[in-house]
Amino acid sequence: MRKRIFEIIEPATKENTLSKIYDIGMIIIIYLSIIPLAFKQEIWLFTIIDKVAAVIFIVDYLLRWITADYLFEKKSPLSFLKYPFTVMAIIDLISILPSLTVLNNGVKVLRIIRMIRAMKVLRIFKTMRYSKSIQIISRVISSSKDSLIAVCFLAIGYILVSALIIFNVEPDIFDTFFDAIYWATVSLTTVGYGDIYPVSVLGRVITMISSVFGIAIVALPAGIITAGYMNELEKK
């Protein structure tokens, strides 16, 4: 019985029609549950959608938990303890918590969770388990994590160095070191909001250099992921 439940709730294979129906139904529920976030006013229909979606997500979470031993290659009782700490289980739980106040308004602690209503938008990540493309990208990120971590440290180091330089070159413009880090991050990504900017010639030269090198650093992760994605497609 549990094995059959696992086969249904897991992403469908071509032969498993019931699992396909379950997957499509879950995707529809996920997107419907996000619609109320686009409106400020409370509408009775949105409340019903929220309640129904919360119940469905809770049932889905529990079903995945009680069949967790089929998820891991090595079946053992420890699988039930390990599952709540997997990435997708954490996403599932976080997407459920803000709706618990709808189900039980008497719990004061859970009213605090209602304040972070925007956390419901994480439900969109629940669709990751149903998308083959996203699963490929997840494998690419996992296989390229060493390169991506190296680029991340390179970007952080570059931001800190740039911030330190501009903070000392333009002391009148940047009141705090955080302002300098904010400017360095914006320059690195070449966004350029223009709310904080250097006024001296030296400061502007540093900004130009920072932006040029920022393009190269920002392009590195895209190149790594693209190369990994192409390799995964070739394997398939």
Image: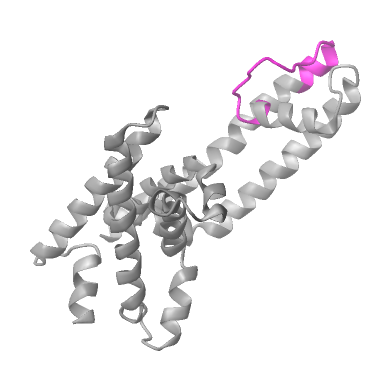
Question: Which of the pair 37/233 is nearer the observer?
Answer: 37
Magenta stretch: includes residue 188:
yes
| Quadrant in the picture for residue 21 | bottom left
Q: Residue 82 appears at what percent x and percent y?
A: 47, 77
Q: Is residue 158 visible?
A: yes
For residue 16, side relative to residue 169 (left or right): left
**63, above or below 103, in the image:** below
| Residue visible at 45% across and 85% down in the picture | 78
Residue at left offset 42%, top offset 27%: 40
Where does the image place residue 172, in percent across and percent down from the top left?
Answer: 90, 17
Q: Is residue 29 left or right of residue 84?
A: left
Residue at the spot 62% in from the left edge and 48% down from the top edge: 151
Task: Tell me which segment is drawn in magenta.
Answer: 187-206
Q: Quadrant of residue 20?
A: bottom left
Rendered view: 135 above or below 49 = below
Q: Position of residue 192 (x, y in %)?
A: 63, 19
Q: Name the residue nearer the viewer: 216 or 66.
A: 66
The N terminus lies in quadrant: bottom left
Residue extending farthest to the bottom is: 76
Q: Quadrant of the C terminus?
A: bottom left
The picture places residue 19, in percent across and down from the top left corner, at: 16, 63
Name the dominant secondary structure of the magenta segment.
loop
